[in-house]
Image (cartoon, rainbow, N blue to C red):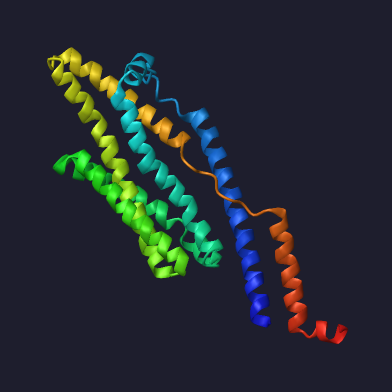
Amino acid sequence: MQATAIRIVARGRVVTDRAAGERDAALAIDAAAVLAWLFMDNLAEATADPGSMAGAARSGQTWLMSFLYIGTFGSFIGYSAAFPTLLTNVFDRPDIALAWGFLGALVGSVSRPLGGRLSDRVGGSLVTAGSFVLMTAGALGALYSVTGEHLGLFFASFLALFVATGVGNGSTYRMIPAIFRGAAVERGGSAEDLAVMRRQAAGAIGIAAIVAAFRSPSRVPKPSVRTWQEVANETVEAVTDSMGVGAHAS
């Protein structure tokens, strides 16, 4: 019973630490926004280009790439939320979720430049297709690991998913300028056509990012008031049982 009480208290401490971490992160974001508003004054030459964005929106290639980017970047966001949540809810390891929950987002971010470099060598379409194949294999492994509660396989499958999404993010973004450059060459390849398509490619990248971010399942479950009450009640019951209070009372 003492071990049970210690474990429940530890789980309550994990919930407390997580809430404190979320609060600190929110404060850091607010501080960064205020500092950027006050001191980020070196962007005088950066102006919006609605015409390029409108031109990119009229291209079917823009929406096709946006759909692909939902599959890579949207999956990256969803997996980043699911990784620590499954560790806590399925494997009952909130300690691992708190200590290593950041690992997936880190691996995915570090893998992103690799997708761009591979695309330069073998082509963005092949790299993007390969990333979706790897994501399928990783998802099947993750499903099997959750069903059988195989923690090692779960970790390996999710790391493979994060690598695949990171590589896919880089390769998808690398494809967009190449697609619009090819369209300029088909028009004749003049300097003016290349300049127009370069601006439209920038607009397509912005549209793809907006669409993927809008469709990303970024909601992460948060501890509720009932959870705090249950942790407190279970802690009291476990401690009193371990001390024999319940037996004397009965």
> Looking at the rendering, in which quadrant would you find the N terminus?
bottom right
Q: Relative to 246, does residue 209 appear above or below in the rendering? A: above
Q: Nearer the viewer, residue 35 or 126?
A: 126
**Which of the 4 quarters of the picture holds residue 20?**
bottom right
Residue that extends furthest to the right in the rendered view of this protein: 249
Left or right side of 84 for 138:
left
- Say which of 64 and 31 sits in front: 64
**Left or right: 204, with 95 as reference point:** left
Tell me which residue sits at (24%, 19%) in the image. 197
Residue 181 in picture, x, y percent from top left: 19, 24
Query: How many numbered marks have been drawn onto this rendered protein structure?
Result: 0
Is the residue 247 above or below the residue 84 in the image? below
Return the x and y of residue 152 as percentages of the image width and height: 40, 69
The answer to which image quadrant residue 182 occupies is top left
Tell me if 207 is positioned left or right of 196 in this view.
Answer: right
Is 250 or 19 nearer to us in this picture? 250
Residue at image point 24% right, 22% down: 198
Could you tell me which residue is drawn at 72 percent across and 70 percent down?
A: 234
Quarter of the figure that contains the C terminus: bottom right
x and y, in percent, of residue 185 in the image? 14, 20
State whether residue 39 is above or below residue 221: above
Write down the quadrant of residue 107 in the picture: bottom left
Q: Position of residue 133 (x, y in %)?
A: 28, 50
Which residue sits at x=37%, y=21%?
46
